[in-house]
Amino acid sequence: MVDKLCVLCTRIKNRVRELVLKEGHPEGGYQACLDLRYTKRKLPVRVYYNGRYNGINKAEVIGTAKLGLPRVLEVLAAIFPDLADVRIYRIDFAIDLLGIPVSFFLVNCHIARVQNFRLYRSRRALSLYLRSSSMRTLLIYDKGRLLKRKKDPMARILRRDDCLTRVEVQLKGSVPFKQLKDIRRYREVDLLEDLRFFQRRLEPHKVTPIQLLAAAGLRWLVGTHGLQAVSKLFAPAEWAAIRKGYLEPMQTVEIPPLHELMRKRMDDWFEGRIRFPRIKEME
């Protein structure tokens, strides 16, 4: 599904412009900003009018995941004269995985040639940024705990022992498809193609005591800091040797079908089908 959508356009409808100038306030380099949910228009969108340096207008759709594409297009059509002129500035895609904890991705996932890794721990949740940059971010976090903390009605469908993890890809600026009319083409892109899964190599009857201790040390490091972070502690040649000796690619049957799930959730959102996390995939 699409969890967030921000678009840009050089033109804006006169009635919207007048409303934003009358009731809005300057914000973030724009002449005026107004959340239309709290106006007579009651549209789920925040409008930024007349950027200080380029004169471009921005619209941030609120609650994108719960709207679906048909409704989003209706909302944007009420703001901009021609949707053919509307460009995508930011778009986030997400899938929710029931029963797979964030720690699974922490200890098993790796992306080559990525430096900006971040890990946040708290008493209640774990958030993992396998990639974090100004243009592309891969975020994995405990969605179930977040819903419960916010007392979101969606949390009621989760049982006490349920684990709901969100995998989210955030694209900004130089996105693959800039025109809003091409938004459905994102299903052609594997947004997680560079994500690799590894597991520890288990051959206890063949290892020496030193190798056994090294494997235990690696296991502790990965469990504490994550596979991605540990890989950055070593030079590329050293890490290649460690990976060859102590890790092996995870079996396909053990890896969640992320690309397939992402594409299915995109199709649902594009068609306006809003699903709940507990709905099982049809065979």
Image (tube, helix red, strand yellow):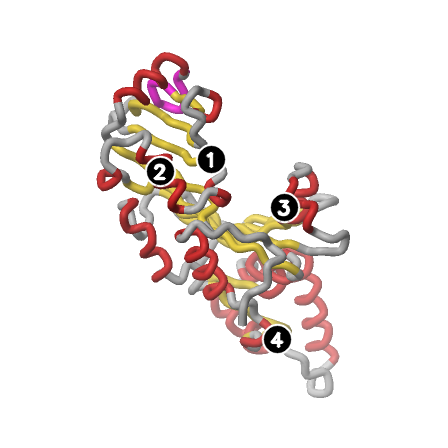
Q: Residues within 10 Å of mark 2 (few under 14, many from 20)?
A: few
The amino acid type, in three-letter code, at marker 3 is Tyr
Tag 4 residue: 246
**Residue 94 appears left or right of 270:** right
The answer to whether residue 33 is visible is yes
| Sequence order check, earlier mark of 4 and 3 | 3
Query: Does the magenta-highlighted stretch encompass residue 29?
Result: yes
| Sequence order check, earlier mark of 1 and 2 | 1
Find residue 211 and name its label: none
Tag 1 residue: 62
Q: Secondary structure at mark 2?
A: helix
Distance between the alpha carbons at the discs numbered 4 and 1 = 46 Å
Q: Position of residue 144 (x, y in %)?
A: 66, 49
Instruction: Tell me the mark number nearer the camera, choosing from 2 and 3.
Output: 2
Would you place residue 78 above or below residue 218 in this image?
above
The amino acid type, in three-letter code, at marker 4 is Tyr
Instruction: Tell me the mark number nearer the camera, choosing from 4 and 1.
Output: 1
Residue at 59% over, 78% down: 245
Find residue 120 and name its label: 3
Q: Which residue is at the far right?
A: 160
Would you place residue 104 above or below residue 154 in this image?
below
| Sequence order check, earlier mark of 1 and 3 | 1
Q: Secondary structure at mark 3?
A: strand
Region in magenta: 25-32
Distance between the alpha carbons at the discs numbered 4 and 2 = 54 Å
Image marks 1 and 2: residues in contact by CB distance under 8 Å: no
Q: Secondary structure at mark 1?
A: loop
| Sequence order check, earlier mark of 4 and 2 | 2
Tag 2 residue: 74
Distance between the alpha carbons at the discs numbered 2 and 3 = 38 Å
Distance between the alpha carbons at the discs numbered 4 and 3 = 26 Å
The amino acid type, in three-letter code, at marker 1 is Ile
